[in-house]
Image: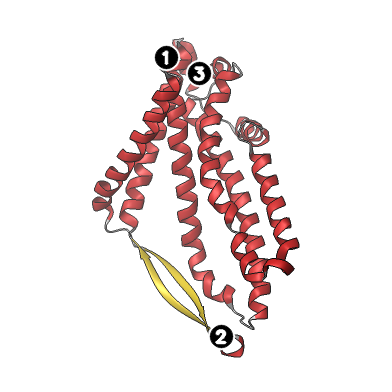
Amino acid sequence: MAAGASQRRTGLTGRRFGLLLRKELTSLEGLFPVLLGVTLLWELFLVTRRPTWGPGAVAGLSLIPLGLIPFWAMWAGFQSVRAEWNGDHAQLLLTLPVPFWQVQGVKLLAIWLQAALTSLLVAGAAWLLARELLQELRVSGLWDVIWPSLPAASLLWGVLLVQLSIVAQFASAVWRTVPRLGGLVALWATVLAGWLGGRLSGLLGYLFQWVPDLRLLGVSVQGQGAQAVFVRYPILIDSGPLVGGLLFALGLFWVGALLLERAADV
C-alpha cells in the first residue's frame, strides 16, 4: 500500500485528465441530460405560449431553470462520489497514480462545465425573449447597460455553484466513512458545513477587506414607448466574505478527498 501511495502522488497527466474529464461529462449519474432536456423543452414551450401569455410573462418565466441549477449542482456533487462506490470503482481509482483530490477536482470541473452550459442556454433564451419585449417597448441598448456587470455576476454564480457542489461531495464522502445511518449523517454534515461556512466566511472576510468589492449594475426601465429610459443604480458586494467562503470550501474539498482516500484504503 505504501508503494501505491507513492505512485498516486505522481498526479494526472494531460491524457489521464482528458479521459477522466470525458468520463465525468458523459456520465448519466448527475442527471445532466435530464436537466438540459427539461430546460430546452421549457424554453421551447414558452416560445409557443408567447402569443397567449404575453412577452413580459414569457421573458420572466424563461429564467425559472436558473433556480434549478443550484439544486442540480448539489445532487451532481453528491452523486459524483456515490457513483464510484455503487459501481465498485473506488478500489480501481485507488490503484491509479492520481491523488483523490485530483479525481474530485475533475468531477467538480465537469459539474461546473455542465452548469455553465445550462446557464448559458437559459441566459440566451431569456435574452432573446426579453429582446422581443424591449423591441415592442421601443427600448434599445440593454446589452450596453448590463455588459459591465456581466463578469462579476458570472463570477458570483460560478463560485456559488462550486461551493454547493463541494458541500455535497463532502456530505457524500462522510456517508462513506460511517457503517450505519449514512444518510442521516450525510444530512447532518450538510447542515453543519453550511452553518460553519456561513460563520467562518464572515470571520475570514475581515482578513480580506483589502480585496476590491464587486460592482454590479442594477437596471430598471421607466416609461414606455419613445419615452422609455434605463435607470441604472450601483450594487456593491463585499468581496471579503466571498473570499472567506471560497477558502472554507477549498478546505472542505481537501477534507472530503482525504476521507474518500482513507475509506478506499480500508
Image side of residue 70 versus residue 38, left or right: left
Residue matched to label 1: 180
Q: Is residue 209 above or below residue 144?
A: above
Q: CA distance from mark 3 to mark 2?
A: 66 Å
Residue 68 picture location, percent across and down: 56, 47
Residue at the front extreme of this rendering: 52
Name the residue at 56% across, 85% down: 228
Left or right placement of residue 188 versus residue 5 in this view: left
Mark toward the start of the polypeptide (1 vs 3): 3
**The quarter of the displayed image where residue 20 is located:** top right
Q: Answer with the quarter of the image where residue 191 lies.
A: top left
* Residue at 48% from the left image edge and 16% from the top image edge: 264
The circle drawn on residue 7 is 3
| Helix, strand or loop status at disc 3 | helix
**Amino acid type at mark 2:** Ala
Counting from the top left corner in percent of width and height, residue 104 is at: 50, 31
| Three-letter residue code for mark 1 | Arg
Q: Nearer the viewer, mark 3 or mark 2?
A: 2
Q: Which residue is mark 2?
A: 228
